[in-house]
Amino acid sequence: MVERLPQAFEQTADVLELLAKSGKVTVERGEVKSEVATTAAELRTVAADSEQLGKSLANPASALFLMGGR
């Protein structure tokens, strides 16, 4: 499941942008274009973070080593 998480976040960002371009997104506050861009960027950041999480979970010993250094 963790391996698919980055792809899911990327695809969600893509769909959100497509829906916004076709005028099918509304927001309560702010400008649609700006809010969609911010949300899509955040989703892509989470995608990158979840990719790193997946790599860490694939090798539990390295994950423990990284956490021990904090």
Image (cartoon, rainbow, N blue to C red):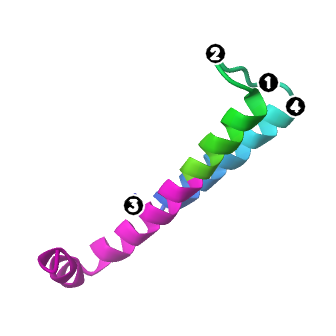
What residue sits 64% from the left and 46% below the top?
40
Q: Position of residue 69 (x, y in %)?
A: 16, 80
* Callout in the foreground (1, 2): 2
Q: Give the range drawn in magenta.
A: 44-70
Q: Which amino acid does label 2 sit on?
A: Glu
Q: Where is residue 18 in the image (x, y as percent from the top left)?
A: 80, 40
What residue sits 72% from the left and 36% below the top?
34
Most foreground residue, 48 or 59: 48
CA separation in Å, label 4 and label 2 = 18 Å
Label 4 residue SS: loop
Q: Which amino acid does label 1 sit on?
A: Lys
* Position of residue 63 in the picture relative to residue 3 (left or right): left
* Position of residue 1 in the picture relative to residue 41 (left or right): left
Q: Which residue lies furthest to the front in this view?
A: 30
Which residue is denoted by mark 1 in the rendering?
Answer: 24
- Disc nearer the start of the sequence (3/1): 3
Dot 1, how many residues are within 10 Å of its Cα: few (below 14), some (14-19), or many (20+)? few
Which residue is denoted by mark 3 in the rendering?
Answer: 2
Residue 23 located within the stretch drawn in magenta: no
Label 1 residue SS: loop
* Position of residue 49 in the picture relative to residue 22 (left or right): left
Q: What residue type is labelled 3?
A: Val
Which residue is denoted by mark 2 in the rendering?
Answer: 28
Label 3 residue SS: loop
Which residue is denoted by mark 4 in the rendering?
Answer: 22
- Disc nearer the start of the sequence (4/3): 3
Q: Which amino acid does label 4 sit on?
A: Ser
Q: Residue furthest top?
A: 28
